[in-house]
Amino acid sequence: MIIVVRPDSTHEQIDHILDRIQELGYKPHISRGELRTIIGVIGDENKLQAEPLAAIPGVEQVLPILKAFKLASREFHAADSVVEIPVPGRAPVRVGGGYMAMIAGPCAVESAEILDDIAGKVKAAGANILRGGAFKPRTSPYSFQGLGEAGLKILQEAGRKHGLPVVTEVMDPRQVEMVYRHADMFQIGARNMQNFDLLREVGQARKPVLLKRGLSATVKDLLMSAEYILSEGNHQVVLCERGVRSFEESTRNMFDLSAIPNVKGQSHLPIIADPSHATGRPDLIPAMARAAVAAGADGVHIEVHSCPEKALSDGPQALLPDQYASLVGDLRRLAEVVGKYIF
Amino acid sequence: MIIVVRPDSTHEQIDHILDRIQELGYKPHISRGELRTIIGVIGDENKLQAEPLAAIPGVEQVLPILKAFKLASREFHAADSVVEIPVPGRAPVRVGGGYMAMIAGPCAVESAEILDDIAGKVKAAGANILRGGAFKPRTSPYSFQGLGEAGLKILQEAGRKHGLPVVTEVMDPRQVEMVYRHADMFQIGARNMQNFDLLREVGQARKPVLLKRGLSATVKDLLMSAEYILSEGNHQVVLCERGVRSFEESTRNMFDLSAIPNVKGQSHLPIIADPSHATGRPDLIPAMARAAVAAGADGVHIEVHSCPEKALSDGPQALLPDQYASLVGDLRRLAEVVGKYIF
Amino acid sequence: MIIVVRPDSTHEQIDHILDRIQELGYKPHISRGELRTIIGVIGDENKLQAEPLAAIPGVEQVLPILKAFKLASREFHAADSVVEIPVPGRAPVRVGGGYMAMIAGPCAVESAEILDDIAGKVKAAGANILRGGAFKPRTSPYSFQGLGEAGLKILQEAGRKHGLPVVTEVMDPRQVEMVYRHADMFQIGARNMQNFDLLREVGQARKPVLLKRGLSATVKDLLMSAEYILSEGNHQVVLCERGVRSFEESTRNMFDLSAIPNVKGQSHLPIIADPSHATGRPDLIPAMARAAVAAGADGVHIEVHSCPEKALSDGPQALLPDQYASLVGDLRRLAEVVGKYIF
Amino acid sequence: MIIVVRPDSTHEQIDHILDRIQELGYKPHISRGELRTIIGVIGDENKLQAEPLAAIPGVEQVLPILKAFKLASREFHAADSVVEIPVPGRAPVRVGGGYMAMIAGPCAVESAEILDDIAGKVKAAGANILRGGAFKPRTSPYSFQGLGEAGLKILQEAGRKHGLPVVTEVMDPRQVEMVYRHADMFQIGARNMQNFDLLREVGQARKPVLLKRGLSATVKDLLMSAEYILSEGNHQVVLCERGVRSFEESTRNMFDLSAIPNVKGQSHLPIIADPSHATGRPDLIPAMARAAVAAGADGVHIEVHSCPEKALSDGPQALLPDQYASLVGDLRRLAEVVGKYIF
């Protein structure tokens, strides 16, 4: 940590800054320049970043030197992590380290019939994980809110039947136990990326977690939220870039695809991409799924519905099963170019 | 709702759009122009906005005509709502309709002594509601997370002693009951503005709620989140503008002060401003608190700490009690100019 | 300037960094910590910030210590600058240091009659500078582009007649001479804030400049653009906050009013606010003009038109003359509270 | 165009709206709903979008139905445009319709020797267009501003020697003639995307233009700026996505790669991607160049320097020639998968 001292600060203020640093248990190292005095602070930077050093009179700036996350960092764990999602009676699905997550399914679980149909089709097309929401975070209280536990059961059954592990969103710490019983992977949605109690709760569960980037979260914020889960002992975390808020009006969000190599440079955790939520437009999803694979994503998360115009949630952004199947063909060829394989 | 049809759509597609609208129980009204055909859809727009009309083949755009919120709107309730926060043994504190909420206190409750000192000073300066966090949403799992129930008790005691109602953040639906017992007003923080289970839970409680705008929430999103609380039967909602994420690096957030008159034009709910979180810089807080009052805010929420450099949370953005007292003097004079009163 | 060295860098890389710094004529000062080595670089930071130090192998981060602007800074010139705009046959209009610029007029100069009418009315209401565009930057090539030199003459005449200095936009370096002949103050519009050739050209002219913040410019960028003008020898610069691009859809831009005290803390230059462009909504303009004055702005820039529905440019965001007059009354009272005067 | 009438508007107001529409030469078509009256306006929408309809009393919203650009649209020209950049004594380089622009070179032209070296290396690696700035838009007046005409001559010579057409930025309408004499393609930089006088000037020249997206420009804004050039008669326009401003701090800009398929769906113009400016980080450039090709870009623009640490501009974001050569190998394989060819 480096403290830059205001040019108009007094000797007393500088002495007080040095005292304060020592009081907190760190070692200051002062260096007087012509225009500014700077003070290096030596000690555990994770703890240091939580201290209110900027509030000491005479301090102009506080510049952190080290990253604020630790367990999620490449410095802590150099090799790519591989997350395993169990499938009853089969080899688990692996994500990371060259293995691609092909997550597909409807936005919301609507009925056993519709889901069975979609599950069969996405499985045939090449998906290896089935998604579907039973608890839906909707901007409006008047929109469809999901089937709840009934939806979880339908999802679990469809997954078992088609040999696909299932991932589904958990929105409330009180739902964690119930979702644990029915799903193979928790999803933390974008709106809950900084719902810290929920992060802690899934951190204590022993099932993989798909953690989606928040609408206004920086890459660092995303890794800090992963750190919450990891620090509770759950190391099975897969990150997901799904677009952030921006001024661009023609797409639902702005797909920050550079987050993929950006995260991979700093962290060992797998990261996948969700072009469905990132763009909100079926005409853009295939191109952006291709881009995600070429950028090095460890998988793609795509909403598929056999009848988008009747979907109870986010129908306008779903691909048809045929469109998905044709896309997977492209993705296989691209994955090969970047040294990855879609099984 | 207006549907714009793609110029290359077929007669069959248009017929299918019309059929689908009727199937859903609405009335279509077609109008063929030279370059585009448009279809008006008549019926309950709240329900309509949840239908996946944009997913019907041949549809180019879907343009909503009405607002998506209802109970929060001026059309539903024309006069300014006044929210009352009870104080044991005194007249309640009123917010809205000319009454100003002067919320002040430390970011986090740290100890009974520190809080008692701050509470006495902000009360003397003119504050009418005491704030302090017992549950703290922190980006890093390694930062101070709050004192929990012990903090709530300290806060409640300080409030009682100084005759101030207390407001404190609730982060988890499981905490609602406990916070209900100790606090006079719930705070929903920015990161939880779209934590819909939490909104429903406080919507079922019968205590006022301070709902802060999310970091990437539009004004409409904020009002939709208020609608969640109102639709559960709790009408005691006060909104709070506290800055949103932007590209500007020199302030913690971007203070969207135009949200104040923007909300007041559309909604009857009171809205206050929080220049502490919006700017994150004590050198900017007084000017922006003055601006908020001049813009028509129903109150200001300001972090005050008697020793910011030792604060366990957000010390660098706290005002000193003296700075707060001097600011309240300015605010009183400005409030008068815009027809409001600070008691 | 501080260089943070990558943890995996070799001795050779560190030696090369030190050599490179010395080659460039600066003095390095190395400090080896447990986790990171950091190198202080001593010398002229303005020049240093232009060096590609981050490209030297082994460098992790480069942290600037000083501000990148100089002539615009409070360190260079501590007292508030007062910019004087000449009026033929009268005392000049002063802006800054307690003097308020009350700039008003139509978006575009449309005809002598319309402008004469508006000029008379805004003068009576309390405006002290008349605005009107003769060259209009329009997003669409099919929109009205301004009357050009004919418009400048109409503007000059209206200003002379009503005893108001006039400000008008210059978009192209080739127009500077012509605008110089007819206007009392140049306006550099938001889209041209980083049109550096144009900045240099008005920097060489000897007339005051109103420099508007760009749609995605940080406060630092704005001050750097002012630095371009100042470094050419023209010190008569007034800055203007007029809103930036954001995700909020219900206003034209996001009014970053905290830029007012933010600039005033760092720079001696006057800064005014333009709630017309910042909000794009006449229902929000009065509240935001009041807020701007309370935040410490050195003036407000407001579009006024006697018949907005017939305006050739930006009609929907203009106030009527009566609305403007009533607003000026409020602003006078608020200005007094913050220690300023509107004459 | 559709006008939504306020629910509280009077009969007189509605009649006045209808009269006004007819006065302007359009045909109104009224439709009274239960909650809102809407008025369809029939006529030339390009002209209509310039009318201040929202300023008519009683109007709540104005909803455009058609796109605001015309010559740039797929409706005007269905097939992909192919832009040809001439090379003396050879077949021109084609961009669009399956042909890829491989633009490479240093940020700024620094000397004949350095440029000759880089040009030879990028040509060998597979580049087909040489870039280099002679006029540099720099945030700070104290940074290197480019060699001006001397730089243009060096660039032209290097291009001729290595058989590469050259592209270079033009910042000022007064430079257009000079740049025309030395370069094969104009570049309009991000900061000048809405410098409308400059757009008109290159629109009148008869050489291809590379138009970069502005830092806060929407996709629609970019297409409107292209429309300025096209409407002056120059149809040789290539667009370029190069990142926009966002809250993410770890990259220079946010690379909005979805703009590639988004533009291609609406417009016949070729669009390339610039991962160098979009990310500002050499560790992210290769992955994002791969992503751009997979997303369907008609080329990539990459800064290459043989000694980034001595570059006079933007050294920290340049690739080394070897890195570029290895990247081109990947891009060739990816281009093939998406049906394009890099020669």
Image: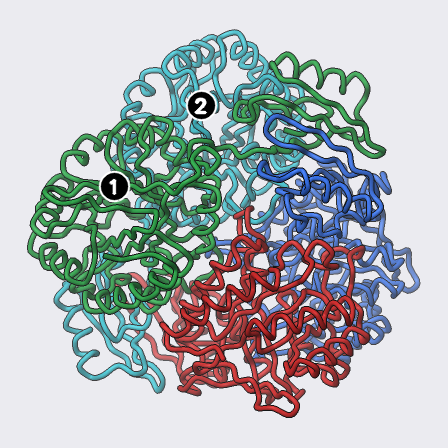
Chain colours: A cyan, B green, C red, D blue
Judge left or right: residue B190 versus residue C138: left
Report which quarter residue C317 is drawn in. bottom right
Amino acid type at mark 2: Val
Location of residue D136 with respect to A132 vertically, above or below: below
Judge left or right: residue D140 versus residue D171: left
Q: Residue furthest front?
A: D12
Look at the image and tell me whether residue D124 can be seen: no
Q: Chain of mark 1?
A: B
- Asked whether B193 or A217 is in front, the reply is B193
Look at the image and tell me whether residue A204 can be seen: yes
Q: Can marks 1 and 2 be said to lie on one chain? A: no
Please name the residue that numbered disc 1 is placed on. B84
How many numbered tags mark residues here? 2
Location of residue B211 with respect to C224 vertically, above or below: above
Q: Quadrant of the N terminus of chain D?
A: top right
Residue D323 location (% of width, % of height):
61, 56
Disc number for residue A331: none
Check disc 2: other Cα within 10 Å, few if <14, some if 14-19, many if 20+: many
Please name the residue that numbered disc 2 is placed on. A93
Name the element at disc 2.
strand
Q: Residue furthest right?
A: D89
- Asked whether A228 or C322 is in front, the reply is C322
Residue A220 location (% of width, % of height):
40, 50
Name the element at disc 1.
strand
Real-space Cα separation, disc 1 to disc 2, in angstroms:
55 Å
Q: Judge depth for marks 1 and 2 and give the one in front.
A: 1
Residue A255 location (% of width, % of height):
56, 42
